[in-house]
Structures are given as structure tokens and as C-alpha cells.
Image (tube, rainbow, N blue to C red):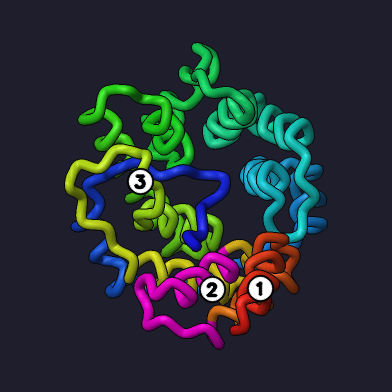
Amino acid sequence: MSKSIAPILLVGLVLGSLAGSAEARKVKKFLKPNVAALQKTCDKGTLKDCVRLGYYVLDGYYGAKQDVDKAGTLFKKACDGGEITGCSGLGRQMSYYSNELKDDAKAMFTKGCDKKDAPACYWLGRYEQDIPKKNELMKKAYAAYIAACDAGDAASCEEAAGMNRHCHADFYDQGVSWDEDAATKLYADACAADLGSSCSYLGGQYEEGRGAAQDYKKAKLYYQKGCTLGDSQGCDWLADLKARGF
């Protein structure tokens, strides 16, 4: 059973040379965000914290209740205050349920990507139909996610890990060399920072032997941690593994 990645879906990218550098990364101490504390600092005008909180609320990270409308409010506050990453976030919120990229969201993504904002480049790439352009945008996004991961942002580690995984055969495959080893390391980094979804994905890596020797005991351990941290898919995958006798 292949563990799919939510909310992102993968495309075929030339990421090998970038992903290969993961082993040599010198990761700073990971931040373990306090959602309530982020809300307070955002209320006091720290716009970057509004953006961080916006993404946690948008996807339900770190125990935040998923609320797409609230995420939009947080992103708009940051964007209106001149924080470019808030504009990128607002573009993402505006296109969250859409299969088509509207002009206003595209403009926000383009502006953010020009400033090397990883989500902006990623979502521009997701909607881009020209394959060479798509790959260039995704490589730029990956590099930015790795930089943010190295600076201690666990959610960026998870996004980078997702881009290393070859688990969506219905997307473009240009003969790319996927790097499951790098994905496993990145999920482990994010799990160590108590990002529940990454713990669940790490369990999937062990269950399926992706980037790590197949180990059902470790898979159960990480599914349990993900579940305990509030990731429902970790609970589901743990129950499935137990139902199959492991």
C-alpha cells in the first residue's frame, strides 16, 4: 500500500543533484511551533508569524484546526502589511479548491517565486503545463524548501521530502532518478520536530522499505507517534498494519 502525500502531489523533476546534498546538510535546531503563541505574535504585528500560522491552519499542522478561511485572513494581513510570503500564501488559499490557476493567484505566486519563496514556486510549477518550465520552477522550489528546512522549519523539510518521493505514477516521469533516501532523512528531521504528518510518512517509508530497510516495528512506532500528534492518517495506517497481523 503506497502512502500518498497530502496536500501536495508530485511531478517528475530533475532533483537528483539537489536531493543528494541532503546527507551533508547541517541542520539548525528545529522549531516546534506553539500555535497559540504564533497567534499572539501575529496579533502584535509579526507578519512572518502570521504567514507561518496561516500555513499551519491551512493544512492543519501542529494541532491547528484546519480552517481555510482563517488562513486567508492571516495571509491577507501579512500581504497587506508588505510581507511577500503572505501574498504567496494568499494565492495558495485562493486556489486551494481549484484545478485552475486564476490570474490574481498567478500574479501573487509569480511575485513570491521571484523572491525565492518556496510555496510560490512550487504552486506555479504545479499549474505550469510546459514541462521544461515546470521542472525549472520545481527545482527552484526544492532548493528553497531545503534552505528553509536547514534553517529549522520542519514543514519545509516535509515538503522537500514529498518532492523526493516517486509515488504518483500518473504524473510526469522524465526518467528522473528519485531519492527515497533523502526523503526518509527529511521526514525524520520533521518528525523529530513533532510534525505528526511527517512521522506518519516516515512510518510509511519503513513499512514499504523506501529509503530504509523494511521494518514493521519501526513503521508502527512512527505511525503511533504521528497518531498521537494528531495526524489521522497515522492512526489509519497503524490500524491497517495491525489488522494485517503486524
Residue contact between numbered discs 1 and 2, judged by CB atoms under 8 Å:
yes
Of callouts 1 and 2, the N-terminal one: 2
Q: Residue at x 37, y 40 (%)?
A: 170
**Callout 2, which amino acid?**
Gly
Identify residue for label 3: 169
Which span is picked out in magenta? 198-218
Note whether 58 is above or below 73 in the view shown: below
**Callout 1, which amino acid?**
Leu
Q: Nearer the viewer, mark 1 or mark 2?
A: 1
Identify residue for label 2: 203
**Callout 3, which amino acid?**
Ala
Side of 72 where 3 appears, left or right: left
Of callouts 1 and 3, the N-terminal one: 3
The answer to whether residue 83 is seen in the rendering is no
Identify residue for label 1: 238
Residue 147, position as x, y percentages in the image:
39, 56
Q: Residue at x 66, y 60 (%)?
A: 233
Report which quarter residue 242 is drawn in. Answer: bottom right
Residue 225, position as x, y percentages in the image:
67, 76
Note whether 217 is above or below 199 in the view shown: below
